[in-house]
Image: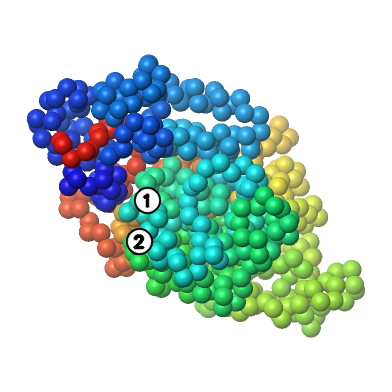
Amino acid sequence: MLKNPALKTVHAASQRYITRQVRSYSRRALTTLAFPDLRLETTVQTTTKHGMDVIHDPLLSKGTAFSIAERERLGIRGLVPPRTQEMDKQLQRIMRNLRQSKTPLEKFVFMTALQDRNETLYYRLLIDNLEELSQIIYTPTVGEACLRFHSIYRRARGMYFSTLDRGQMAAMIHNWPHDQVDVIVVTDGSRVLGLGDLGANGMQIPIGKLSLYVAGGGIRPTSILPVVLDVGTNNEALLNDPLYLGMGHRRLEGDEYYSFVDEWVHAIHTRYPHALIQFEDFKYPHAYNLLNKYKEKYCCFNDDIQSTSAVALAGVLASLKARGKSIDTLNEERIICVGAGSAGVGVCEGIIDCMVEQGKVKTREEAYSKIWMLDQYGLLGNSLLQDNDGARSAPIGLGDRSNLDERQLSYLKKDMKDRMSLEEVVKAVKPTVILGLSGSPGVFTEGAIRAMAANVEKPCIFPLSNPTHQSECTAEQAFEWTDGRAIFASGSPFKDVEYKGKIRKVNQINNAMSFPGLGLGITVSRASRVTGKMFLETAVTIASMASEDQLKQGILFPGVGALRQVSKEVATRVCEIAHDEGLARAPMRPGTSLRNEIEESMWVPEYVPTIRIDGHI
Ligand SMILES: O=C([O-])CC(=O)C(=O)O
Ligand SMILES: [Mg+2]
């Protein structure tokens, strides 16, 4: 066992037993002068590396925090400044430097550099300042980092599978240095947030999502894998940019595209059969087609469709409570959804599933009748009733309803004119909730929101597109146009708003609230599939987290700062479901509660003594 390369030993161990106990070393070894920092019960990490290789490995490095004994053992004496600095001092220094960076993008580059040097410190900093720093390494700044990926690129992270690699993927996957991978986030960069096709620049999204898996869901940093499937890009600016780092051809489509993804999924499955695959930022309809193709065969889900849906549903359910209603009255809501892509359709399907599950609608069709969907041309309505006054109808050749698929057509309102504007639909429908998943900033117009507020006491206004500048309206607008009565939630963070002398609370409905906990539950239970029930219950769990007092103030659930607590609850529920549905492959440890098991399995960034293994101990 000691002959194994050290990291291999650590990674092959189960999620729970992250590092080995010193107990497994002989007492003789422990009494030697090389181990004065260890006691019998100390947890250690082991490595075969030595000298500069230890300092330059971000998974092993402690920067200035190596103890004298470690410096001796690892051959790094003299290679770092003499004073051993504890983590809290390092954190002070890093935070001071970070705050000196002027722009969010500079902060992003700073954080990436820290992650590349010392992952333990990076995650400690992130966990201690989640609210502030998630806005840098994740939405909204990650959007800007994707736009500039090819100019801020410094150091390799994650894996790229490109059209050059067809036929080679099953071999290539072995280039990844870790034997245990629990969570993979993969994108083809075709619809990055609300920013469109960014090709291989989309890599920052899987990296950012996985940082939240570690910081918010306690997944081990060695067990994550960010992936870009570079099938080309249709983004002209990138195609014409000589510094672009992705493939310089147009996107594969049709069979070529699907067989490319197929090869990758099979390659992944051969090396990492237990890993959870999260599909991220795939454009419509690829997102749905891939999900349908793989969800019954592999442990996978689509974040934009399913976890956005879970958090949006959680938001709507919590808003019912905030309006003094019971959460099982969802069928009484009138919901407008602006956006008919993967996120819009996904969110609405989650709401429909929940209405059906609550049993208050007789048929699925009845549930569809509670949601009015608009795309970029307006309401999905009856084109025979289309108003052809020119101003409102789309130019010839655009807005052709014949390309709507079955899923979108379920929302088509046969008794209403096609392409009605949002304001017209609001006046006709008197919605209680309005959802924005359009990627079109400003589509929640003043007229539409004022018309909504004229009919309901507490209008729920949820502009969910990301990043911030793609939001359908701002928090200030929502409160101003509703005379401060709105229950407001956005996809990207906004600050609370002072309106008429009172602070109005904003909420963030971002899938970040759900996927880390879901991934943790799947990892601990080793669930073989991700099911609809898991998402439904994730929503109900999140919706039950705000106190009565918070609900009264318009707070729907705790924010990103409380992500670890939220993840613990979500993971516990997901584990229970995995066991109930017969999908769990990890046995329950006798005598432990699921919640304890989840808690114990969450990785905590702290320095543990490092031991060099060279076969002599
Ligand atoms: O990344 C985010 O902030 C949420 C998300 O998945 C998206 O907007 O595509
Ligand atoms: Mg996404």
Q: Residue furthest bottom?
A: 384
Residue 233 rendering spot, x and y as whole percentages = 65, 62
Q: Residue at x 51, y 61 (%)?
A: 161
Q: Secondary structure at mark 2?
A: loop
Indicate which label's residue lies in the foreground, 1 or 2.
Answer: 1
Q: First in sequence: mark 1 or mark 2? A: 1
Label 2 sits on what residue type?
Answer: Tyr
Mark 2, Cα crowd under 10 Å, few <14 / some 14-19 / many 20+, is some
Mark 1, Cα crowd under 10 Å, few <14 / some 14-19 / many 20+, is few
Instruction: Report the front residue among 103 and 427.
Output: 103
Q: Is residue 40 visible?
A: yes
Q: CA distance from mark 1 to mark 2?
A: 12 Å
Q: Residue at x 29, y 30 (%)?
A: 74
What residue does disc 2 label? Answer: 272
Q: Secondary structure at mark 1?
A: loop
What residue does disc 1 label? Answer: 177
Left/right placement of residue 585 relative to residue 254 reads left
